Structure formats: structure tokens, C-alpha cells
Image: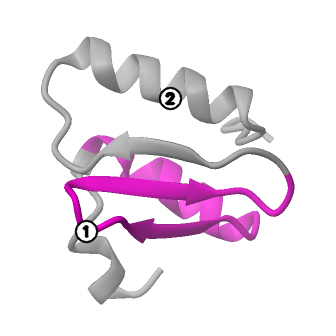
Amino acid sequence: MSRRSRHFIPRPYRALARIAEKRNWTITPTGSGHIRWRPPVGEIVITSATPGAKASVIKDRARLRKAGLEENT
């Protein structure tokens, strides 16, 4: 992940972004305050670029896992 790409990824998602990029996911800002996570195969997941509560981060992580992003593999 380049330094430039980290600017739009909030701290709670940075570790996931590193894992996602190693697994050929595409991560891009949408321009409307969100982040688009595109897996090689499957559905796109949109998360907030400014996560507020811890509960929203937990829900986003669950949605990314459901889309195929495994953290422990």
C-alpha cells in the first residue's frame, strides 16, 4: 500500500486494507465520504471514510468478512 493511498483510509481500517490489497482487493474513495472495497470476485462493500462509533467499525468488519475478506488466513 502506498503512502498516498493511506490518506483516505481511517486508522480502524488500515490493517484490513493491507490484508485486502495483498488479496487483490481494490480500495478507492468514492468522493462522497465513503470507501469502496471491491473484492476480486463478489459484491462491493461501501464503508464510511469517517467511522464514528466502535459499533459501526465492528459492523463494517463483519460486512467485509461476509464479502470474503478473511483476517486470519
Q: Name the residue: 72% across, 26% down.
A: 66
> x, y percentage for residue 53?
16, 18
Q: Estimate the x, y position of residue 22 in percent, counting from the top left.
A: 69, 68
Give me the C-alpha separation between circle 2 and circle 1. Answer: 21 Å
Q: Residues within 10 Å of mark 2 (few under 14, many from 20)?
A: some
Q: Which residue is mark 2?
A: 61
Q: Earlier in the sequence, mark 2 or mark 1?
A: 1
Type of amino acid at the residue the image marks with label 1? Gly
Q: Secondary structure at mark 2?
A: helix
- Could you tell me which residue is drawn at 29 percent across and 12 percent down? 55
Name the one closer to the observer, 28 or 9. Answer: 28
Q: Which residue is mark 1?
A: 31
* Residue 20 vertical placement versus 8 (above, below): above
Three-letter amino acid code of the residue under disc 2: Arg
* Residue 54: x %, y % from top left: 23, 18
Q: Classify residue 45 as left or right of residue 31.
A: right
Residue under the point 51% across and 48% down: 16
Q: Which segment did they paint magenta?
A: 12-41
Residue depth check, mark 2 versus mark 1: number of the one nearer the observer: 1
Q: Is residue 48 magenta?
A: no
